Amino acid sequence: MEMDLAGFWVAVAVSLAALFWWWNDYWYALPFRLHPGSVKLPPGYMGIPFIGEMPAFLWYFKLLCRPDDFINAKRRKYGDGLGLYRTYLFGSPTIITCTPSATKMVLQDESSFSMSWNNVELVGATSLVAVEGPAHNRVRALVVRAVNQPDALRKITLMVQPRVLASLSSWSNRGRITAFKEAKKVTLASIGMYFASIESEDILETIDDLVTGVISGIRAIPINFPGTALHYALQCRRRAKAIFREELEKRSKFEASVAKNDLMEALMQMKDEEAIMWAVYYLAKYPEVVVKLREEHMLLCKKLGDLVTYEEIASCKYTTKVVEEIIRMANISAFIVRTAKKDVDYKGYRIPKGWKVACWLRYFQTNPEHFEDPMCFNPDRWNEAPKAGSYMVFGGGPRMCAGNMFARLQVAVLLHHLVLGYRWKLVNPNAGMTYLPHPNPADDVEIDITRI
Ligand code: HEM
C-alpha cells in the first residue's frame, strides 16, 4: 500500500514536470488540437512558461560561444527542409526562419508581417523604421537619397575624411587604443558632421551617451514611470532631439530636409562602428591581406593625408572584396524580428497571428552550405557572387538597410588611410569572443598602433 502511494506521487511529480517542461508547447498548440486541420505549427520546442527557450539560447550564445549551434541543434532534431522552427524567446511565441525562401517570404510581405517595436515611442511612431506602406516608401526614398546614392556618397567621402585622418593620428599618438570605442567616435562624428555639421567633440559625446540610452530602452519593459529604463530612454531621446534641433537651427544652409526628422533614427540604425572594429581586428590577424590592400591603395598615388575620392575608392576592387568579407564575418545583425499581422500558412505550416518571426540572418553568412569554410576570413571568396539569397547581412525586401552603401564606403575610406599610414597589432590576439548583445572580441579589440 505504501509502495502504491509512493508510486502515485512519483507519477504525479513526473507528470507535473513534463507538463511544466512542455507547457508552452501544449498551450500554444491548443487551438490546433481543438480544431485539427491540415495546417500545424512548425516543428520545435517552446520551453517552460514565460522563460521558453531562453536557457538554450543563452547556453549557445553566452556559455558555449557557439551561436550557430542553436540553429544546428534544431536542424538535427527537427529536420531542415522547411526552414521554420517554433520557439519561445524574449517573452514571445516565435517562429524562426533560417532558409532563404522562408526568410524572403517574411521580409518581402509587408501586408502579413510588420516591424516589431516594443517601445515604438523611442524610435518615433512616424519615423522611417516604424511607418509602413506608402509613408514608409516616401521617407525611405528621402533617407536613401541622403545617404546611399552616388551623389550623396561622393559628398560623404570627402566630408568624413578629415575626421578619419584626425582620429587615426590621435590613435597613433596614444599608441594603444580600444578599436571599438574609437570606431564609435569616428562613425558618430561622420554622421553628426554629415547630417548636422556638428563638430564639437563634447556635443558628439553627449549625443553618443544619449543614443546609447535610447537604444537600451528599446527592449525594456514598457512601463514609463520615473526610475524605469523606458522613462530614462525617453528622456535621452528628448534631450538628443533638442540638441539636434538647436544645432540644425544654427545652420540655414542645411538642405537635407530628411535630417530634422530622421537624424536620430539613422543614428540608431548605424552599425558602422562594429564593421570598423572588425576591420581593424581581421586585418591585424591577416597581414597578407594588408599587404595586398596597401599595394592597391598605393596605385592611387596619393600623398599621405591626401583625400581620396568616391570614384577612386570604388576603383579599388580588392578593397571592395575585403570590405564585403569584413561585413560578412562581423554578422552585426544576428536576427531581425517581425510580427505576424494575420495567420500565415507556409508549406502546410502556420505562423499564427500575433507571433514574432525571427529571421535568423547570421545563419546565412555562417552556413557552410552557403560559404565554403565560413569562419575563415577570405576576401577572395568574393571573386564570385554568393548563391542567390544566401547573403543577408543587410536584411532584405522593402526594409533592407537604407545605409548599406554608406556603411561599405565608411569602412573602405578608413582602410585606405589605415593601410597607407599605419601598422598595428592586437594586444590580446587570443582574446575570447562574446556574442551578446553583438559579436565582439572580449577586449573590444585593443591594439598597439604606430605610424609607418
Ligand atoms: C555594417 C553596417 C550595417 C549593417 C550590418 C546594417 C544592417 C541593417 C539591417 C539588417 C537592416 C534591416 C532591419 C530590418 O529589416 O528589421 C537595416 C536597416 C536600416 N539601416 Fe542599416 N546596417 C548597417 C549600417 C547602416 C548605416 C551606416 C546606416 C545609416 C547611415 C543604416 C541605416 C539603416 C536604416 C535607416 C534602416 C531602416 C530601413 C527601413 O526600415 O526601410 N544602416 N540595417
Image (cartoon, helix red, strand yellow):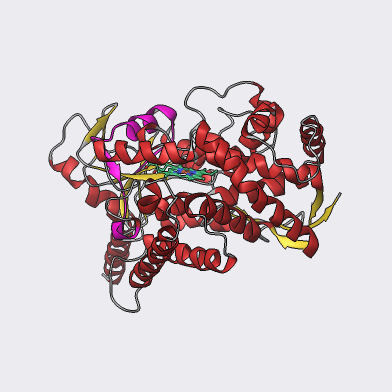
Q: Position of residue 174 (x, y in %)?
A: 78, 64
Q: Where is residue 240 in the image (x, y as percent from the top left)?
A: 42, 65
- Per the rendered image, the range of residues in magenta is 95-122
Magenta includes 120? yes
From the viewer's perspective, tell me whether residue 132 is left or right of residue 31. Answer: right
Q: Residue drawn 43% across and 31% down?
A: 99
267 or 80, which lies in front?
267
Q: Which residue lies furthest to the front in this view?
A: 252
357 or 318, which lies in front?
318
From the viewer's perspective, tell me whether residue 231 is left or right of residue 363. Answer: left
In this orientation, does residue 213 appear? yes
Q: Residue drawn 46% across and 53% down?
A: 267
Q: How many labels does the image show?
A: 0
Vertical comparison of 255 with 295: above or below: below
152 or 40, which lies in front?
152
Vertical comparison of 262 with 347: above or below: below
The image quadrant of residue 53 is bottom left
Q: Residue drawn 57% across and 58% down?
A: 63
The image quadrant of residue 235 is bottom left
Q: Position of residue 103 (x, y in %)?
A: 39, 33
Q: Where is residue 127 in the image (x, y as percent from the top left)?
A: 32, 50
Q: Residue furthest right?
A: 452
From the viewer's perspective, tell me whether residue 443 is left or right of residue 41. Answer: right
From the viewer's perspective, tell me whether residue 416 is left or right of residue 206. Answer: right
Magenta includes 330? no
Vertical comparison of 13 with 268: above or below: below
Vertical comparison of 403 with 217: above or below: above
| Quarter of the image where the N terminus is located | bottom left
Q: Residue furthest left?
A: 35
In this orientation, does residue 435 appear? no
